[in-house]
Image: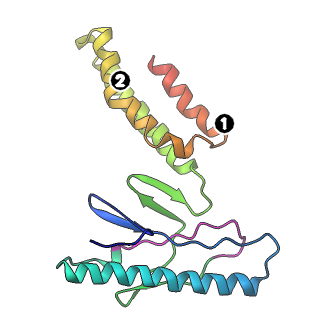
Amino acid sequence: MLQTSNIHRYADGSTADALYTGRANISRENVAEYRDKLVSEVESLLNKVSDWGRLNLVQLNPQKTQVCAFTAKKYPFVVSPQFQGTPVAASASIGILGIDISNSVQFRGLLEGKAKLAPKKLGVLSRARQYFMPAHRLQLYKAQIRPHLEYCSHLWAGAPQCQLLLLDRIQRRAV
């Protein structure tokens, strides 16, 4: 088994993380140095994953590897690590277990996606209302629609109120 606290495994993949914490008034040169060191650490983690894959006869796809730099700095994170000889370009967001997280840790896109899909599901339930008693419709709502709205809500619960109002409107319309 791969033993490292920076690699998290789940059903069909794994996630590795590395971080550095800077200060508010740090120079660009120091930031570049910290970022280079961070990329080296990420490459080291990716090498461990690659070695583990070789030992366990698992073929990994470097093209599916994602990297996202979460930063409050204004200038972009341009350094990219390599995985099995393939450069991994930093993307503006990363998808982990069905949640897209932007590099600025904003959940607007995620919430808008939920706000688009939930009314479609509600529409299907509404068109089928003649076939179900109210208690059954409520049960279907709780089983098929509400979990979609609440999935990973602890992550995006701190989003701006204007973004959360979209989901509140859907909830009110449903009940």
133 or 123: which is nearer to us? Answer: 133
* Quadrant (top left/top right/bottom left/bottom right) for the N terminus: bottom left
Please name the residue that numbered disc 2 is placed on: 141
Residue 161, numbered label: 1
Q: Secondary structure at mark 2?
A: helix
172 or 43: which is nearer to us? Answer: 43
Q: Residues within 10 Å of mark 1 (few under 14, many from 20)?
A: few
* Residue 54 lies in quadrant: bottom left
* Quadrant (top left/top right/bottom left/bottom right) for the C terminus: top left
Relative height, residue 104 to residue 26 (above, below): above
Q: Which residues are magenta?
A: 64-76
Relative height, residue 75 to residue 108 (above, below): below
Residue 80 in view: no
Question: Which SS type dominates the magenta stretch?
Answer: loop
Question: Is 95 left, or right, of 53 in this rendering?
Answer: right
Disc 2 residue type? Answer: Tyr
